[in-house]
Image (tube, rainbow, N blue to C red):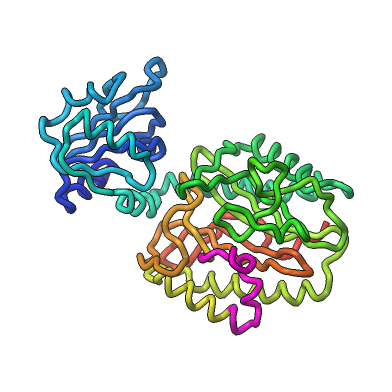
Amino acid sequence: MERIEKISQVLKNKSINSAFILKPLNIFYFTGELVNGVLYVSQDDAILFVRRPKERPLSTRTKTVFVDSFKEIKGYISASTGRAGFELDSIPYNLVAKLSEALEFREFEDISHEIRILRMVKEPIEIEKIRKAGEIIGKTFSQVQEVFVEGMTERELLLELDYYSRKNGNLAIYRMHSFGNEASFSHILQGEDALVSSYLDAPTGGPGVSSAFPQGSSNKRIEKGKPFTIDVMVNFDGYVADATRTFALGYFPEDFKVLWEKLNSVFRFLCEDLLSGRIPEEIYIKTLEYVSSLGVMDLFMGRGKDRVKFIGHGTGLEVDEYPFIAKGFKIPLSENMIVAIEPKFVGEPFGIMGLEDTFVINNDGPESLIPFESSLILL
């Protein structure tokens, strides 16, 4: 079924006359074009109203009308729009107000959740794009050995890897659904830097290099014998893969290796449960119980009050898509969902260790899309 047909079916199921989709990324998902405009969908029709660009050729199969204001839309749709659907978790109130005034619809309803559910199960072409993003991540991890030199700072290493990933096809745009969250190419963190929390809803934070973006790598030099993580996102043709590996210069401390085995066992425990039909909330609760049995709950997924309340997340056009391996998320896993699993330990004196892979859920189990070893990497 075509994507627009799927949203039309949602409208029928909810007895909604029409939907006005304004978020550019959702417009892209449904039409293949990233524009400033409005995608109007009724139970039997769809029109893409484009405000910008007007001079750039568009290749969408959706009927397209160029407009300068919302008021022009009224002449192309039914006189009475009745109940209308909006992405109320993503768009500013004033846009809804302007459309309400221009089109005189009587009621509106949030369809954000339904759109996220539609995007949750990936089509083959989407999976291939995420797979290619994962391949770039694998090559980028391999490049660490080539570009790393003793005395390099976290940020210097980040810039080398960012440059390499872009040369290999990384669009370097990392979109997030959650309001106020922003993402960067990588968090490369060691020691004390890894203990610094940030406003980002993630187990790692880091001080960054500016108060205007206080997350990620700093100008601190990478020290010998102190493990550090490289948490990388790559965007290939709009679709994101996410992965983390743990490195050290010279040697890994023996007590760190013991703790690593516990982290690795948590990762394996999670992977064994990534099966079609499993409930993400149940996976989350079982994993916390397992972590507690290992005696490392105080280190798991962040520090103190800033510990995050998930262990995995979907990826796709955005970094934080459905499904979430978290309490409260009860939609069963199914074939062709994409999930990034990211168990991490953060604490003193070791700083940080982490292991993350992006998986596609298959009927016979999860398939990693990150072609790179999951063991500790010594430089």
- Residue 347's spot in the image, x, y percent? 71, 68
Task: Tell me where residue 209 sits by quadrant.
Answer: top right
Name the residue at 37% across, 40% down.
Answer: 91
Q: Which residue range is magenta in the image?
A: 291-310
- Is 309 in the magenta? yes
341 versus 128 height, above or below:
below
Name the residue at 33% across, 53% down.
Answer: 113
Q: Nearer the viewer, residue 347 or 116?
A: 347
- Residue 169's spot in the image, x, y percent? 60, 37
Q: Is residue 364 left or right of residue 138?
A: left
Q: Is residue 44 left or right of residue 339?
A: left
Q: Is residue 23 left or right of residue 240?
A: left
Q: Residue furthest left?
A: 79
Name the residue at 67% across, 76% down.
Answer: 262
Name the residue at 80% across, 44% down.
Answer: 147
Residue 164 visible, this angle: yes
- Residue 379's spot in the image, x, y percent? 83, 56
- Is 278 in the magenta? no
Task: Tell me where residue 24 sits by quadrant.
Answer: top left
Residue 146 visible, this angle: no
Task: Tell me where residue 332 sits by quadrant.
Answer: bottom left
Q: Nearer the viewer, residue 236 or 195?
A: 195
156 versus 122 height, above or below:
above
